[in-house]
Amino acid sequence: MKHWILLALVFCLPAAGQTPVEKQAVTLEEAVRLALERHPDVGKAKAAADALKGKIREVRAQALPEVTVVGNATRGRDPSLLNASGLDKFPEELRNALVPSPVNLFDYSVSVKQPLYTAGKIGTALRLASIESEGALADIDRASQDLALSVVKAYYALLWAERYKTLVAETQ
């Protein structure tokens, strides 16, 4: 047990020749920048805006032509002729000539669908999507501004608390 405590103390304490790492002061701009990079609310707002961009692409795709290409290949060999009931009455030369050969069938088709008239559905959907996009950008701005305000308040509250602490220490 004593060995474990000794090992823990040796590994936790800094080495004798090692200087302690000084705390680096964070400026207000750095604090705001770090908060904007790492806070999940800003990330959620950006993710919602990206999802909305995908929906806009989806709506635009409805106005584009839809092209479908289908290919089909079939290879068949039908020996059912050799099972006919009167085949044994045919001459031998004819029966030997009746060898089923394989048949290849190829089928290709191309179809194009283009909406000519959608009663304004696509245009209206695009207008609504652009309005929602503006709202999503406003949400990103709002989340960023709320976070920046909170960081500034916390930063100045910390400065005030440190100043108050030094004043209390000086008066005692």
Image (cartoon, rainbow, N blue to C red):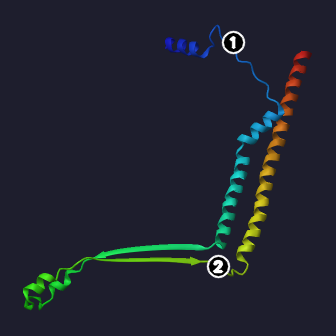
- Judge the density around disc 1: few (<14), some (14-19), many (≥20) Cα neighbours within 10 Å: few
Assign a secondary structure to mark 1.
Answer: loop
Q: Residue at x 64, y 69 (%)?
A: 61
Q: Residue at x 84, y 42 (%)?
A: 149
Q: Residue furthest top?
A: 16
Answer left or right for 2 relative to 56.
Answer: left
x then y, percent, for residue 83 = 15, 85
Whether pointer 2 and pointer 1 mark residues with C-beta atoms closer than 8 Å, the reply is no
Please tell me whether mark 2 or mark 1 is closer to you in this view: 2
Q: Residue at x 70, y 45 (%)?
A: 40
x then y, percent, for residue 118 = 69, 80
Query: Relative to residue 153, is residue 88 depicted above or below?
Result: below
x then y, percent, for residue 121 = 71, 76
Assign a secondary structure to mark 2.
Answer: loop
Residue tagged 1? 19
Answer left or right for 74 relative to 28.
Answer: left
Return the residue nearer the eye: 88 or 11.
Answer: 88
Callout 2, which amino acid?
A: Pro
* Dot label at residue 55: none
- Judge the density around disc 2: few (<14), some (14-19), many (≥20) Cα neighbours within 10 Å: few
| Occupied quadrant, residue 81 | bottom left
Q: Residue at x 79, y 59 (%)?
A: 135
Residue tagged 2? 115
Answer left or right for 144 relative to 19.
Answer: right
Query: Relative to residue 144, is residue 107 depicted above or below?
Result: below
- Quarter of the C terminus within the rendering: top right
| Occupied quadrant, residue 26 | top right
Query: Relative to residue 151, is residue 46 depicted above or below?
Result: below
Number of residue marks? 2
Callout 1, which amino acid?
A: Thr
